[in-house]
Amino acid sequence: MINQLLKIISKIAASTDEVLPDILILKFTIVNAFIIRMAEKKWVLIDTGLENSYEYIMMETEERFGEGSRPESIVLTHGHFDHTGSVLRLAERWNVPVYAHPKELPYLTGKKNYPQGDPSADEGLVAKMSSAFPHHSIDLGFRAAALPSDGSIPGIPGWQWIYTPGHTEGHISLFRERDKTLIAGDAVTTTKQESFLSVLTQKEQIKGPPAYLTPDWALAKESIDLIRMLNPKVMLPSHGKPISGNELREHLRLLTENFYEIAIPESGRYIEH
């Protein structure tokens, strides 16, 4: 019932914004996915939303790129259910590879399950529901592929993947040095993802990764420190609204300098780790 509620909300609120001339954000309220355009009909999909995001993604891509179009590849920031809900159907429909960090591949090939969500991490409704979220691995089979070790991303030259673990073992962010654009995944969020009201309203708030699904806070802090060092000018999070310029710099400063107060929950099963 909980998962059905999340799916209904994400479907009702689905919309697309052009945040940069070559980047589209697919907003499903619960989570964001992204399209990076390299040419008129060459593009890459970053994450795939929930299971019922499939129809919207197909509608948007066919309207924008033509019926029968397909991406060069799908790239996953990580394998949590709200980022991979449509990936099996899309990868099969398009017959394209799905790239992820090598440490994330066991969760995408049926070999390893994620830990369950921790409802004790926050008093928000989403956190309280989190133990019921899907946490079992999926199996992409031969379509699952490791990202190149040199940091490049197939299909989108000029971008590099940045290793930002903590939220998951193999979490990545995507960075373009030319204009310092960062797709953060769940490494940094700009809304309180633990709160259902904040998710619905997209109320801006300085936050780290979702507390109920982050098992390694030491790595999460290192990842946010790295992101700040990159000095991004535009940040596109998977949860929350895009942020840029001075507001982004101040956001990252406050988060890195006050990480233990802002990001880490006061209680929860992962705190001792």
Image (cartoon, rainbow, N blue to C red):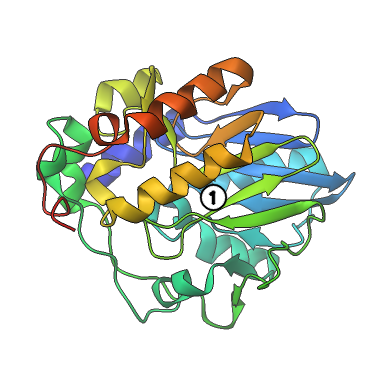
- Give the image location of residue 164, x and y in percent: 48, 54
Residue 164 appears in view: yes
Tell me which corner region of the image, top left, top right, bottom left or bottom right, holds residue 273.
bottom left
* Left or right, residue 195 beside residue 104: left
Relative height, residue 211 to residue 73 (above, below): above
x 41%, y 77%: residue: 106
- Give the image location of residue 180, x and y in percent: 71, 36
Q: Amino acid at mark 1?
A: Tyr
- Give the image location of residue 223, x and y in percent: 45, 49
x 37%, y 59%: residue: 168
Residue 13 appears in view: no
Q: Quadrant of the N terminus?
A: top left
Tell me which corner region of the image, top left, top right, bottom left or bottom right, holds residue 149.
bottom right
Q: Which residue in the rendered view is the most extreme toward the right?
A: 40
Relative height, residue 129 to residue 131 (above, below): above
x 47%, y 23%: residue: 251
* Left or right, residue 117 beside residue 55: left
* Left or right, residue 267 beside residue 26: left
Q: Which residue is mark 1?
A: 54
Tell me which corner region of the image, top left, top right, bottom left or bottom right, holds residue 260.
top left
Secondary structure at badge 1 equals helix
x 41%, y 21%: residue: 202
